[in-house]
Amino acid sequence: MSPDRFAEIASRYKGLRIAVVGDFCLDRYLEIDPARAETSIETGLPVYNVANVRAQPGGAGTVLNNLVALGVGRIEVVGFRGDDGEGYELQRGLEIHPAVSTEHLHTAADRRTFTYCKPLVVRPGEAPVELNRLDSKNWTPTPKPLEARLIESLRAVATRCHAIIVLEQVDAAETGVVTRGLLEAIDRITDERPELLFLADSRRGLKGWPGVGLKMNAAELGAMLGRPPAESVDDARRAAAELAKGSGRPVFVTMAERGIVAADPAGETVHVGSLPLRGPIDVVGAGDSVTANLAAALAAGASLREAVELAAVASSVVVHQVGTTGVATVDDLAGLLDRVPS
């Protein structure tokens, strides 16, 4: 992609309105100073002294953070948080961005705010080392009144958005934003507005989802088609093309160091390889940067290949941001476009 063509696509981002629907969580980092280690008098166990605490939106919030970094003009949040301190931190972290609307972030007294608490051992001049994570989740079904409010919010944002990203982050079905009822609502909206771009990602897999654009990894692609993960790029291209033809929507498959494969319903397939590594890496958040860049680029009029190229560059930027869930800006992308494998 030429610099001029990228500038043309990126210039349209500020005019976009994109909704992010799904499981917003709080990423809380506890930075531990090993030089201040102690032993508890009461228990005799090691004490980790936390020298700094930082927090940022995670889960669907990581997709949102990447849209903010791209300069998308308006980003609509559809999700829920608990009536708790973590929920306050999450909402504050979202609302710090002027482009973000939390009108449809519902506060639910009967839900906990989904939180990833990540202790990091930080030594001067070294990459942070993450210890065992402490997670707070909901393990009971999302209450029906809350589900109804979420569906109403989805329908509201669908009337004014250029694209909608749906992200399911929970491990247990029906415990988050993406319930069976919400999927049925998406199905109805796609029938009513077939031109509206939907792009979905789920850590539990996308089998049984309505006809929307699908983003997944190679293992998830194999599971959807009832076969082992694709062993080669050509296998992935054929499988993605089969799935795209059946669903009538584009399919995007991330393949780690082998790059990204995509297919559309018309039969076009593309493959963009990964950019060379430039130092230590941390893969957390790379998939979400791919999702955000695919949606923004396609909504801005990029071709299938152009969108995949930008997603591959964004992923390369993010994996080199160690010890945090990173983002890629337009300037970051521009600086690496010439390294995209041909």
Image (cartoon, rainbow, N blue to C red):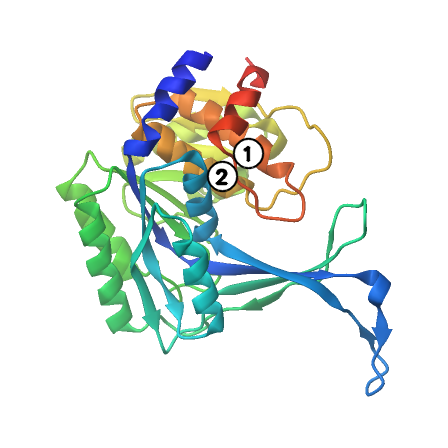
Instruction: Write down the residue under mark 1.
Output: 315
Amino acid type at image mark 1:
Ser
Q: Secondary structure at mark 2?
A: helix
**Looking at the image, do the residues carrying marks 1 and 2 touch, with CB atoms under 8 Å apart?**
yes
Compared to residue 295, the image places residue 184 above or below, namely below
Tell me the quarter of the image containing the C terminus.
top right
Q: Tag 1, which secondary structure? A: helix
Q: Three-letter amino acid code at disc 2?
A: Ser
Rendered location of residue 334, percent (x, y): 51, 22
> Looking at the image, is 74 positioned above or below residue 92?
above
Give the labeled residue for mark 2: 289
**Side of 179 relative to 282 (left or right):** left
Q: How far across and down, in percent of the image, does residue 55 sit? A: 55, 59
Q: Position of residue 185 (x, y in %)?
A: 21, 54
Q: Residue at x 22, y 66 (%)?
A: 148
Q: Which residue sits at x=32%, y=38%?
A: 73
Point out which mark residue 174 bears: none
Classify 10 Å Cα crowding around label 1: few (below 14), some (14-19), many (20 and above): many
Whether residue 303 can be seen here: no
Crowding around mark 2 (Cα neighbors within 10 Å: few <14, some 14 to 19, many 20+) is many
Q: Residue at x 43, y 43 (%)?
A: 224
User: Which of disc 2 and disc 1 is earlier in sequence?
Assistant: 2
Q: CA distance from mark 1 to mark 2?
A: 6 Å
Report the side of 48 relative to 242 (left or right): right
- Residue 93 visible: yes
